[in-house]
Amino acid sequence: MDKEEAKQLFRRFRTNRSGVRKNPALASLCLICGSTDVVPLAGHEPPTMHCRSCGFNFVRYACWKCGETIDGRDPLNPPCGECGWRTCVCTACQPEGCGEQAGHAKAATEP
Ligand SMILES: [Zn+2]
Ligand SMILES: [Zn+2]
Ligand SMILES: [Zn+2]
């Protein structure tokens, strides 16, 4: 991603975060400061990205269940109240499932 592209994405998504998870370039773009100096944080669960310019952290990973990207900055990926993982559009949160969320995830796979 070049600087101009990063700038445009930053302008587009800074205030309107819907669809952030759908754009692969946003995995390495900080929506707080606009930097592309974003690296994965080692040993974090759920998988977390870290902006080396401003120190902002956000979670971004593929859903273990349906494969959709989950991004903590996307309004469609709200935090699960029980485990702290993000909730996917398919309703799954952490891989082991938790409480009511696990029930939801299970029900969705049954015919
Ligand atoms: Zn930043
Ligand atoms: Zn999912
Ligand atoms: Zn959960």
Image (spheres, rainbow, N blue to C red):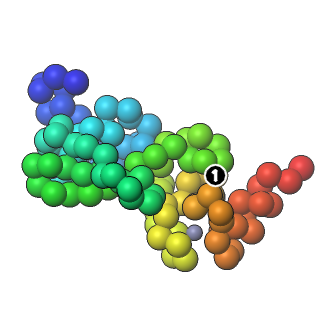
Q: Position of residue 75 (x, y in %)?
A: 42, 57
Q: Examine the rendered structure and indicate whether residue 86 appears above or below residue 67.
A: below
x, y percent for residue 26 = 31, 38
**Residue 55 in the image: x percent, y percent?**
16, 57
Disc 1 packing (10 Å; few <14; some 14–19; many ≥20): some
Name the secondary structure under disc 1: loop
> What residue is rendered at 55% in x and 77% in y?
82
Write down the quadrant of residue 107 in the picture.
bottom right
* Identity of the residue drawn at 27% across and 38% down: 28
Note whether ligand 2 is within 8 Å of mark 1: yes
Judge whether residue 74 can be spotted in this image: no
Task: Identify which residue, 20 or 110, lies in the foreground.
Answer: 110
- Judged left or right of residue 62, residue 40 is left
Tell me the amino acid under the disc marked 1.
Answer: Cys
Residue position for label 1: 90
Tell me the quarter of the image containing the N terminus: top left
Going by the image, does 66 lie left or right of 42? right
Q: Quadrant of residue 38?
A: top left
Is any part of residue 100 visible from this angle? yes
Figure check: 33 above or below 23: below
What residue is drawn where x is 31% and y is 32%? 25
Residue at x 67% of width, y 76% of height: 99
Q: Is residue 10 above or below residue 25?
A: below
Numbered disc total: 1
